[in-house]
Image (cartoon, grey):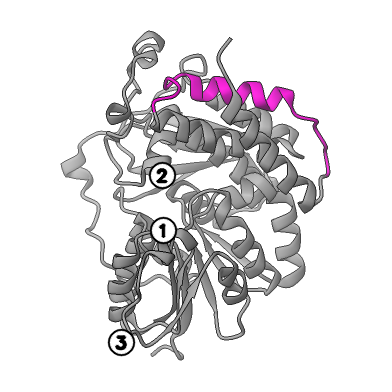
Amino acid sequence: MHSAPRNIAIFGSTGSIGRNALEVVEAAQDRFRVAALSAHSRLDELVEQARRWQPDWIIATDPVAAARFAPPSDLAGQWLVGPEPLVEIAAHATIDTVVAAIVGSAGLPSTLAAIEAGKRIALANKETMVVAGELAVRRAAETGAEILPVDSEHSAIFQALRAGSVAEVKRILLTASGGPFRTWTTEQMEQATLDQALAHPNWSMGAKITIDSATMMNKALEVIEARWLFGIDAERIEVLVHPQSIVHSLVEYVDGNVLAQLGAPDMKIPIQYALTFPERAAGPTLPLDLCRIGSLTFEAPDYDRFPALRLGSEVARRGGTTGVVLNAANEIAVERFQRHEIRFTQIAQACRTILDAHDYEPQPTLETLMRLDSWAREETRKWTSV
């Protein structure tokens, strides 16, 4: 028997994380109630979701898309427009859990609002930790908010850390698939097309995170995220390439024990764990068949072919304003690659230049972070290769 259903707000409900979260809720036998849904521009899909789940609030965060869209009159919930309602709803007294699945820094204000209100946050928006991790973790400790990771790698670390204290950890090993260009030379990657960068071998994800996987910037950002989520200094966080995406990450303890979390490459697994923690429950995923998989392989990462990894380690070590600058520069560089304005290998080059050019502060305010976010975006839009 369970208590009353927990009210969930799913921000970014039409993206891959949001859709998977709704599948988890569907299979959860009334453990959860969808109280709010948001989407940026896929408003037809948002309406379909709202008809199915009957939330109290339906948020179209892109005012331009919303202005061209007439919401049907039969929707039971309140139709809201713009990003501002996300902040109000994240902190609303009736919301128990916020699934933070908005891609990029656009998800930061509502996630911080949920932290301030002491909510449980199922965190898929890694930018919160990359941009403002120190601030977010400190405020969560003060407000009682729970930040539970939805990234498969960080969920794996979170689970493995239940076996010991952070002080007993020798190192964290973040696994990476290597993306579509794992075996490519630098010269080959210089000619990589957008379609090739979007052809991930294991995961079905949105375009931005799929390109991040191809550059391995996603892993760089995850190193930074792990540093703040788990209070582990950067020198104890390493990347391990694992093409099969079955071992989602490992924790090595000082006594020589290494704990790994294994699972199918299915985002529903970490999403469900974040929603049901500390309990485990049967879910909508197929069991892992290791006999069918046969073998698991591991490789050292190549920091020369994938320079984004070096950026991630540097930012995790320095902290301060470096995270917001790297994240903003990467978002714009990825957009420029998608518009065919820069080559694939120039994404990391642009990020390196902008990071080196910014005025570093070790303990920035939120206002400083937001100012540098805008600055880094504008500088990256103007960036040209030397």
Nearer to us in this view, 4 or 340:
340
Helix, strand, or loop for circle 2? strand
Residue drawn at 46 percent across, 23 percent down: 301
- Residue under label 3: 74
Asked if marks 1 and 2 touch (Cβ < 8 Å), the reply is yes
Residue drawn at 30 percent across, 34 percent down: 296
Residue 356 percent across, percent down from the top left? 71, 23
Residue drawn at 46 percent across, 16 percent down: 305
Stretch of the chain drawn in magenta? 340-363
| Cα distance between the residues tagged 2 and 3 | 43 Å
Dot 1 or dot 2, earlier in sequence: 2
Residue 166 percent across, percent down from the top left? 66, 49
Residue drawn at 59 percent across, 33 percent down: 329
For residue 148, side relative to residue 315 (left or right): left
Residue 202 percent across, percent down from the top left? 28, 39
Residue 171 percent across, percent down from the top left? 60, 37
Q: Quadrant of the C terminus?
A: top right
Dot 3 or dot 1, earlier in sequence: 3
- Seen in the picture, residue 44 relative to 219 is either above or below; the reply is below
- Residue under label 2: 248
Q: Nearer the viewer, mark 3 or mark 1?
A: 3
| Cα distance between the residues tagged 1 and 2 | 10 Å
- Residue under label 1: 270
Q: Amino acid at mark 2?
A: His
Helix, strand, or loop for circle 3? loop
Q: Magenta stretch containing residue 352, yes or no?
A: yes
Q: In which quarter of the view is residue 21 placed?
A: bottom left
